[in-house]
Image (cartoon, grey):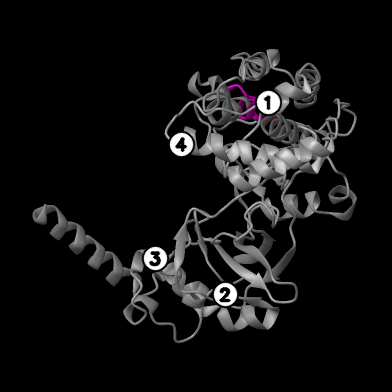
Amino acid sequence: MSTTARPNAKRLEEHAKYLEKLNDREQRWAGYQPWLKSLGYEMRPRYQPGWSASWLTSGIGVLESEDGLLPNIHGKIMDATRVRDGRVVAMKLLPTGRHELSIWKYLSSSALSSDPRNHSVPLLDVHPLPDTDDEVLAIMPLLIYFDDPPFETLGEIMLCVHTYLEGLAFLHEHNVAHLDICAANVLQEPSVDLYPKGFHPARPSYYVSKPGSPKIITGPPYQSRTIAPVKYYFIDFGESIKYDSIEDRQLIFSTVGHDLDVPEFTSGAFIRGVDPFRLDVRAMGDMLKAELHEKYLGLDMLKPLIDAMRRDEPERRPTASEALEMMKNIISNESSDSLATFARPSDNVLLTFLTKQYRRHRWKAQLLGRPPIYPEIPGLELPTPKPLNLISRALTHLRLLTS
């Protein structure tokens, strides 16, 4: 046992030593701190002038120290707090020599951002950098992975799929092909109630017990999406293409994006040209299959849709709008009771804990009178749950108190 403990202790010591200094990418961000402060953005303690590692004096281990957490997006994204309203935002270094910024600005324009079908992440602000013209600083909401925390009900999964298909249909309607749809680029903005005690912006699996605390704690308490709705977004338009009109759409002649295991690429068909919009549909189908259908049980109703989106022949795939209509029909054919059932993960590791969480959140949703899909989808009428009578409300309250 001692021979195992010594190497582990040594590795921990080396890790702590490494974290005592900012790496090159962090140093760049720390150098921007005075400028960012003048713009109204406050960085975390690690990036403040004169920072020294808190674990050297606090008595708290490095693995439990807030300032021991690093940003994990290759140094191109950093979090900060917007001083005027306390909102935590993400700051992204964006190349000026590419079309990403122009497409993002287009999707965030007042005309498009007011459309509820637009699920492209909002561009909150853009700032020229003080030391280079090669990049700009783009400000956007702080987002997390779309499946964190785990989905609890079938209705929550249905709403998520509908939202992303609606967002994809919107992009295509406006002649924008995303071309990099994958789990890393379909994220969510949690409401403040989803994680009642908050989460760490660099690692959502941690939180601090109170603002300013140097200690992080694992496993932030969370509510269900039915109780605390989230916003789902597409991000990263670095590979995207915008055409002026349907008539101006063209085939592409190279591989693109994360999802390279598609027939157009593996067969070499891209040499003859690939329809970027049909490619988006395939990538979305692949993502839904890998991240939802294979990770949760009881989603067989989605299989015909996913199979259609993943057809090897691009011309046989539905358009994004057709896939959205298929999804609406799937939801319409489900009962309210079915949509409110537990979304059981295929991995049983946390099943007992997740089942208990589902029960508690289900009782709370019943007390709130929440429908199984919330917020409700415009144009889709589902039976609303009957309000609990006084006795049922009292019993449900008692269950919550004693569970």
In the image, what residue type sits under mark 4?
Leu
Could you tell me the amino acid type at mark 1? Asp
* Occupied quadrant, residue 141: bottom right
- Check the image and report above or below for 366 versus 131: above
Q: Is residue 310 visible?
A: yes
User: Comparing marks 4 and 3, which lies closer to the viewer?
Assistant: 4
Instruction: Calculate the distance from the C-alpha at mark 4 to the C-alpha at mark 3.
Output: 23 Å
Residue at the spot of label 1: 275
Label of residue 350 in the image: 4
Give the structural element (helix, strand or loop) at label 4. loop
* 1 and 4 marks in contact (CB < 8 Å): no
Disc number for residue 31: none
Callouts 1 and 2 close, C-beta under 8 Å: no
Q: Secondary structure at mark 3?
A: helix
Please tell me which residue is depicted at 62% across the width and 20% down the height of the picture: 299
The answer to whether residue 364 is left or right of residue 378 is left
- Compare residues 26 and 325 and report the one nearer the observer: 325
Q: Secondary structure at mark 2?
A: loop
**Magenta-colored stretch includes residue 226:** no
Identify which residue, 10 or 268, lies in the foreground.
10
Q: Which residue is mark 2?
A: 43
Measured Cα–Cα span from mark 1 to mark 3: 49 Å
